[in-house]
Amino acid sequence: MTEKILRQNDIFDTLGRRGFSFCFFLFFLFFVPAGLQAQEVEASVDTTTIKIGEQITYRLSVEIEDNKVVVFPEGQTFSPLEMIEAYAIDTSKIGDRQRLIREYALTQFDSGSYVIPRQLVLIGDREFRTDSFAVVVNDVVVDTTKQKMYPIKPSVAVPPAFGIPIWLWWVLGLILLGVVAYLLYRSRKKRKEAAQRLPPYEQALFELKQLDDSHLLEQRELKEYYSQLSAAVRRYLDGEVYDHALESTTNELIAYLETERDRGKLKLEDTTITRLKVILERADLAKFANSRPDVLTAKEDRQSVENVIKDTKASIPQPTEEDLLRDQEYRERLERKKKVKKIIFGILAVIILLSAGTAYIISTKGLEFFADTYLGNTSKEMLEGEWVSSEYGTPAVTIATPDVLVRDMSDTTGIAIGRETFRYGSLESNLFVSVNTRPASEDFSLDSALEEVYAYLEKRGATNIITKQEKITTLNGLDGLKIFGTMGFQKNEKSGVLQKKYSILNFGMGEGYQQVVMIYNENDKYAEEIAQRIATSVELIKNRQN
């Protein structure tokens, strides 16, 4: 009986141990992963109640090992709330682990109660879901007796953007390089031919010598023989006597020689002109009428042509001093023309090379890079130039700007009550900066200060002012309110509307009020960087010891 009881106790002990192990397994299976998940991914929001258009900062914090990959939510996964901006991931080290923090700016433009859905975060091959958050969006109460109302502006058609394909820039560049190469080759070839060309008299004798060595007579090629023979004497006359000898007929050439002889400009014998006429007529018959003179006649004509060339050379009168001067002036004029041609060609080559280089830079770097780097950009020059850090007004505001702000002395009423204004630039320019300060006053409020700014802008052509706001903190830890948005600016009816962004930084420290206004062109990325740099440089003097 005792043994039986002992065996039963052993069985119960065994079952108890097994049951405890099973319960521990279930606890590890269901509760431990949840604990790990809670430790690895955390989600939070800075507020659960906003007004229409205000922003909620949604924060995701993930703690992981160094070798793991994290994929945060992307796109509009926070619907029904709208994701305005996803900020850069902030990374920090915690021992042998990493903490990644990413924040999202969310908003909603309709009032009501909404739920931010659970978000999916991937860590390696594991999925984690965050908690959901209930959010209430309240209406904005507008007092129409104080807030001005504006009619809705008509829509404005935006012209379609035009872009030149990159391959077209490459084709144009290759064509321009080809044209430059061809012009250089042609110019070099002409200079080489001119350097190798002999004077007309020596060239004619050289051609007759080549004709003797051609063996055309032995081969009975009389047509070709007479063709080269007449061409040699015509080329000589064209260079020395009559510059139309090559294209003139035989009768026209002989008539010109006789006229020059009668005028005394050529001292040619009648027999020389007659002999030349006979040779040219025989050559015409051989070339065009298939006449075949005998070889002996052809040899005599060859010698006669040489004598005609020599007689003509001797008949040309020597130039007088006046002719030499006239010829010198002519040569100088030709030389000047050549120099002008070289200069024009050089300028053309430079223009073509610059065009090809410009096309290459634009096709590879983009038109904006070319314009900013080579044509100049005022905003970029201000951003990269030397900045000035200075103190303005009472209570004092210290900011860094591209140039010193100038005190505005036009508002004598404001000066009388202690208000001070410092400005840089204008509303028409790509950057406008203003610092306004005033002492503490019971009848003064933030709304009245903003109303003054809006009145100033509207008076000078600002339209369609869209307003947002958020809290800010300066470098020395003082809180403020940032009013920002967009607006249109039109100087007059004839000018176009410029789209601009603005930021108004407002600070009130008890002993006074400080305001920093920045307005810049909407599409000017450098001006936006300038505004951000100015905003981060703001410092307020809490107490001044005398």
Image (tube, grey):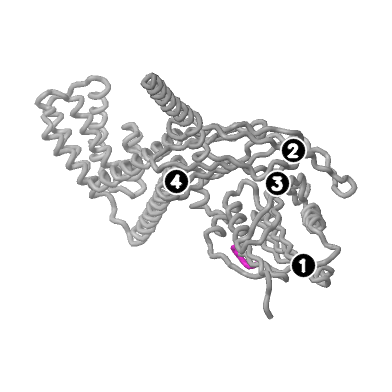
Q: Which mark is residue 98?
A: 4
* Precedes in sequence: disc 4 or disc 1: 4
- Magenta stretch holds residue 5: no
| Dominant SS in magenta | loop
- The type of residue carrying mark 4 is Gln
Name the residue: 31% across, 42% down: 185
Q: Which residue is mark 3?
A: 486
- Image position, residue 388 (x, y; %): 58, 67
State how far apart marks 2 and 4 are (Cα).
Answer: 35 Å
Three-letter code, disc 3: Thr
Which label's residue is closer to the chain start, 1 or 3?
Answer: 1
Which residue is the extreme one toward the left?
Answer: 218
The residue nearer to you, when weighing 502 against 337, is 502
Question: Up-down: is 123 above or below 188?
Answer: above
* Disc assigned to residue 137: 2
Q: Which mark is residue 132?
A: none
Q: Check whether the beta carbons of the residues at disc 2 and disc 1 lie within 8 A of each other.
A: no
Q: Residue at x 47, y 27 (%)?
A: 23
Is residue 509 left or right of 130 when viewed as pictured? right
- The residue where tag 1 is placed is 438
Residue that appears at 33% across and 62% down:
321
Per the model, the C-alpha gap separating discs 1 and 3 is: 26 Å
Q: Is residue 248 left or right of residue 354?
A: left
Q: Amino acid at mark 1?
A: Arg
SS at mark 4 in the image: strand
- State yes or no: residue 402 in magenta: yes
Question: Is 103 on the left-hand or right-hand side of 115?
Answer: left
Q: Secondary structure at mark 3?
A: strand
Extent of the magenta region: 400-404
